[in-house]
Image (cartoon, rainbow, N blue to C red):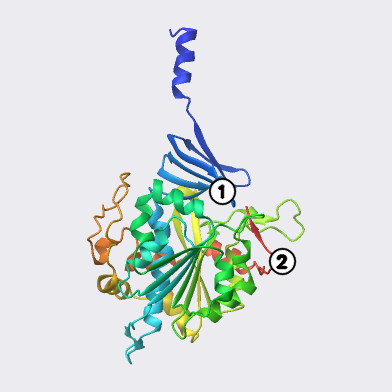
Amino acid sequence: MASHDDIIDKERSKSAFKYVEDIAPGLRLEMDLDKIHHTSISDFQEVQVIDSYFGKTLVTDGKTQSTAHDEFVYHESLVHPPLFWSALLSGTTQPDGTRIPGSAPKSVFIGGGGELATAREVLKHNSIERLVMVDIDPKVLEVCKQYMPEWGGEAVASHPKMELIVGDAHKYLMETQEKFDVIIMDISDPIEAGPGIALYTQEFYQRTSEVLSKPNGVFVTQAGSADFIPHPHAFPEDDDDDNKESWCFSPILNTLATVFDHSIPYTVPVPSFGECWGFVMAFNGDAKEARALADLPYEVIDNLIEERIEAVPGVPDHKYRSKGVKFLTGKEKGSEALKHYDGVTHRGLFSLSKSLRIAMKGDKRIMTVDNPVFMY
């Protein structure tokens, strides 16, 4: 029989530092904290780089932003659908319905994106001539270049097609005279007192519609939690004073729909976030285009990938390896340069669950400067 001291030693051996993140009211994600690479407080937020169950991880204000395990899932899902859709909108449609892509997208704007992985994915498109990225927090950029070069690092930051600006993305878009084929908002969640709330309003979206090129301009934003089966906290009742922080997926969708002809939701599971994640793409055009985006034959996407995608040289790949995920050297082209997105994946992104579609249909909230909606 084990002695008292043996039992104590056994329990001590199981103890470890933990990384704990609040996902939703009453739900936390807990895992071993293997290493803290960096921790600091910028003028805007707390910034940490740690090693956890999901490998190297960027954390801001206690929220996981991306991890070595699955960052490519988030970033490829955010970037490639809108860029390929812009290509198709700029092209022609044959009498048999076949779409011939045009020369777009040539110019892309990224708001946020401090890890540089969103820019990495944009730069894989050989049609790109100019990429402007504006992030408000120089500390995040500095930390990510130093501790997370696999996300993009200096190879992306100093890329000849890239203009990297430390500044306010909202101010930049309000003042710019330039037009962009695609605008990508890879910004912090709309958390009360957070730096990103002004970038989720009807007023801001109206301005983005004016900055986009016509007729092929496409807007996309990350849109927060979007679980397959929504929890009640996601859609608070009007009289629920105890739950004013909720999901923003449907309010973002609704708000964009007041500005653009089409506002299209899509989702992807991100294991390190502990839930599915939402995105919303918006654009103008004929009514039939909205359904066409979700129903694109997988061969169309796969052909675009083979014709247009090339890995960005000089970006080291993650040492942490997820099973079934290829290792990139920076020389790959076509499908070999992507880890997640392809024609089959594209169709899955736009296949929202029945329960999620029903729940979102009943949510009529619109996000404005005077009436913001905050995420948990």
Question: Who comes first in sequence, dot 1 or dot 2?
Answer: 1
Please state the horizontal and vertical placement of residue 344, each as a whole percent of the image.
33, 66
Residue 257, visible in the rendered structure:
no
Residue 247, visible in the rendered structure:
yes
Query: Which of the 4 image quadrants contains residue 300?
Result: bottom left
**Residue at which label 1 appears:** 42
Question: Callout 1: few (<14), some (14-19), or many (20+) C-alpha neighbours within 10 Å?
Answer: few
What is the residue that sits farthest to the bottom in this orientation? 95
At 23% across and 62% down in the image, what residue appears? 332
Q: Amino acid at mark 1?
A: Ser
* Res. 371 mark: 2
Which is in the foreground here, disc 1 or disc 2?
1
Front in this rendered view, residue 17 or 325: 17
Distance of mark 1 from mark 2, alpha carbons? 28 Å
**Placement of 69 over or under 125, stated as above or below:** above
Q: Amino acid at mark 2?
A: Asn
**Placement of 9 over or under 76, stated as above or below:** above
Query: Which of the 4 image quadrants contains residue 161?
Result: bottom left
Q: Secondary structure at mark 1?
A: loop
At 37% across and 77% down in the image, what residue appears? 106
Q: Secondary structure at mark 2?
A: loop
Front in this rendered view, residue 160 or 76: 160
